[in-house]
Image (cartoon, rainbow, N blue to C red):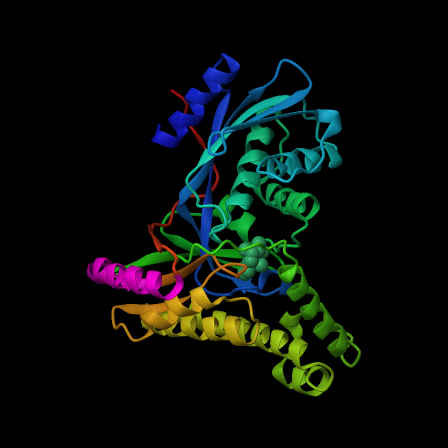
Amino acid sequence: MNTLAERVFNKFGELFGTSPALIVRSPGRVNIIGEHLDYNDGFVLPAAIDKAIYVSVSKSADTNIHLYSVDFKEAYEVAVSDIKPTSSWSTYILGVADQLIKGGYPIGGFNLVLDGDIPIGAGLSSSAAVECATVFALNELFELGIDRMEMVRIAQRAEHAFSGVMCGIMDMFASMFGKKNHVIQLDCRNLAYEYKPFVLDGYKIVLLNTNVKHSLSSSAYNERRQQCEQGVAWVKEQHPTVNALRDVTMDMLDKYVEPKDAVVYNRCKYVVEEIQRLLNGCSDLENGDIAGLGNKMYATHEGLSKLYEVSCKEADFLVDAVKSNPAVLGARMMGGGFGGCTINIVKEEAINEMVEILASKYKTATGLELSVYISNIENGTEIIKVG
Ligand code: GLA
């Protein structure tokens, strides 16, 4: 067992006086390219990383749910029959329990201890990891027989219902289906997916945390989603077979969206361009052309910042600061936006120097600390052997 698994194991014993029935690990994720495409029926290219959520669980002796977060040093208890959203970490666990009950799955009371090392609010999908760990653990515990794909959907519905963020499927999918040293090319229209070896000879994925807390539920995310739907509705008036931005061309946008609304046009333009960029980026990856892929990451950042307007000055600063560094093949803001991390592909031997210079520049420019995570690609949700 590693340290975090030991921690949820030991804490469980301390709180509940027994060993947990099982421990589940569910990772955070990165996304190489294809941002804000999942809810537009597009493609994404995520991977699970070596930062994860751990839960230890067992059935409880009563019909209550007993939760404890090691990070927050906080307990929460509620009857299974009385689950409601909360405004804290517990809402992600309760959201999953609620979806299971709504889906007719017979769950009873349970004890659960939560810990992990995914930084919160960094755009690495800690909430999706909590949801995936919970659904996986409860599926085992109550022998519900749910497959991974359905667990992903349950986790996504939990996020919609209990957090109010109308997120796409990427985060949960990556956490649940991750594979060591591979990225997942996922078609969010039909959920067909393919693992692609992610071979970065001498390069590493470096995440630079702006330490600006993003707030997806601050409505900007849902607003972007609605703007995309508005664009589709305008095109659909002329082309009834169009159902998502995946089906839309630039020509259609120029004709039917641009005259109606400049902002909606920009949002849709970013998405239509990004879908093509992702496909080209996947070809680069297949051809071993990481530099080509890296250039597309810079272009994605430009689109997210100028057209989709989900970046922030801190993330823009970090991307601009590495652009002329020959050791950095590509960089862009990652995830929902408004803070969180930038993802960078950096030559291994140049990482230390880059980070040293950048951290002090960043502090001077923004007054904020820069946190750095060198990420490896790991397996998705799994049971960790106890003892
Ligand atoms: C958040 C959402 C995802 C996805 C990304 C942007 O992480 O949860 O579904 O839309 O933003 O790509």
In the displayed structure, does residue 78 sit left or right of residue 186? Answer: right
Residue 190 in view, yes or no: yes
In the displayed structure, does residue 258 sit left or right of residue 50? Answer: right
Assign ligand 1 to one image quadrant: bottom right
Residue found at x 52% / y 15%: 16
Residue found at x 65% / y 34%: 94
The quarter holding residue 280 reads: bottom left
In the displayed structure, does residue 13 sit left or right of residue 89? Answer: left
In the displayed structure, does residue 234 sit left or right of residue 31? Answer: right
Residue 375 location, x and y as percent? 35, 51
Residue 188 location, x and y as percent? 59, 59
Residue found at x 47% / y 30%: 70
Q: Quadrant of the image for the N terminus?
A: top left
- Considering only vertical position in the picture, is 6 above or below 339? above
Q: Main secondary structure of the magenta part?
A: helix
Residue found at x 44% / y 46%: 119
Q: Quadrant of the image for the C terminus?
A: top left
Q: 79 or 141: which is nearer to us?
A: 79
Bounds of the magenta segment: 345-366
Magenta residue check for 178:
no
Residue 238 location, x and y as percent? 78, 81
